[in-house]
Amino acid sequence: MKSITIALAKGRLADKATELLTQAGYDCRVLQEDSRKLIFTNGDGSLRFIMAKPADVPTYVESGVADVGVAGKDTLLEDNRNLFEVLDLGFGACRLAVCGPIGFDLDDYSRGKLRVATKYPNVSRRYFAAEKHEAVEIIKLNGSIELAPLVGLSDVIVDIVESGRTLKENKLDVLETVAACSARMVVNQASMKLKAEEISTLIRRLRRVLGQDKERGV
Ligand code: PRP
């Protein structure tokens, strides 16, 4: 049996993914230890885990350092790597949206070039080009994106909306939805062939836990 290396996004997504893998019958107890280690091998050696920053998971999987990864759809859209996206894991549900001051009219072009603050420059550029045929000025930020329109750094933002609380408490609103997002399992293209048996077993077991086996007739 070949071991599968899984890149997990440190934090909430990793915790949820671990829960799911455990339900699918994989021994993940090694991840319960309170540790700052970044690489773990499980009890029977079937899985090796590497703990990456969420935005870096696609890089590890595309390079083949990891066979499999769990990443948010938002990250996958931004990175746009050559990976197989094999499963929607359901958790981490949120949406990527254009947000701004309540009542802001995106289609009022008298404003001049739209200034968009975001952690997702590629997604934003693509969205405005495809949907509005508009080239926008991107202001790349690393967090607290909602601050930008409040202080006049940008007109609008493209960001993740989960509960909507951050927007509400800052008197901002969703103007347009860009994409529905959730955690996805991705697979390296070569690993899919070289570790076909182990990876298809993993996918099959996860599908069963997720209740996706019936709808696909697997
Ligand atoms: C994310 C996102 C929003 C917020 C949305 O920020 O960028 O700011 O969560 O969640 P809500 O709709 O439930 O309020 P995160 O907490 O990841 O921190 P960040 O500001 O550093 O990006």
Image: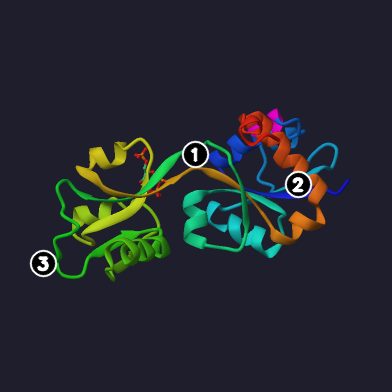
Which quadrant is the C terminus positioned in?
top right
Rounded to the nearest angstrom, the CA distance separating label 1 from label 3 is 38 Å
Question: What are the residue bounds of the magenta stretch?
Answer: 19-23
Camera-side residue of 5 and 88: 88
Q: Horizontally, is 165 left or right of 215 in the view?
A: left
Figure quarter occupied by ligand 1? top left
Q: In the rendered picture of this protein, how many numbered marks are placed on residues?
A: 3
- Percent across and percent down for residue 111 are 13, 66
Q: Quick one: label 1 or label 3, which is nearer the N terminus?
A: 1
Residue marked by disc 3: 110
Magenta stretch: helix, strand or loop mostly: helix
The residue drawn where x is 74% and y is 41% is 202
| Type of amino acid under label 2 | Ile
Q: Horizontally, is 53 left or right of 157 in the view?
A: right
Which quadrant is the N terminus positioned in?
top right
Residue marked by disc 1: 92
Labels 1 & 2 near each other (Cβ < 8 A): no
Q: What secondary structure is marked by label 3?
A: helix
Residue marked by disc 2: 199
Q: Quick one: label 3 or label 2, which is nearer the N terminus?
A: 3
Ligand 1 within 8 Å of the CB at mark 3: no
Q: Horizontally, is 189 left or right of 80 in the view?
A: right
Q: Is residue 21 magenta?
A: yes
Rounded to the nearest angstrom, the CA distance separating label 1 from label 2 is 23 Å
- Percent across and percent down for residue 101 are 18, 49
Quadrant for residue 207, please give it: top right
Q: In this orientation, does residue 140 appear?
A: no
| Type of amino acid under label 1 | Gly
Camera-side residue of 50 and 127: 127
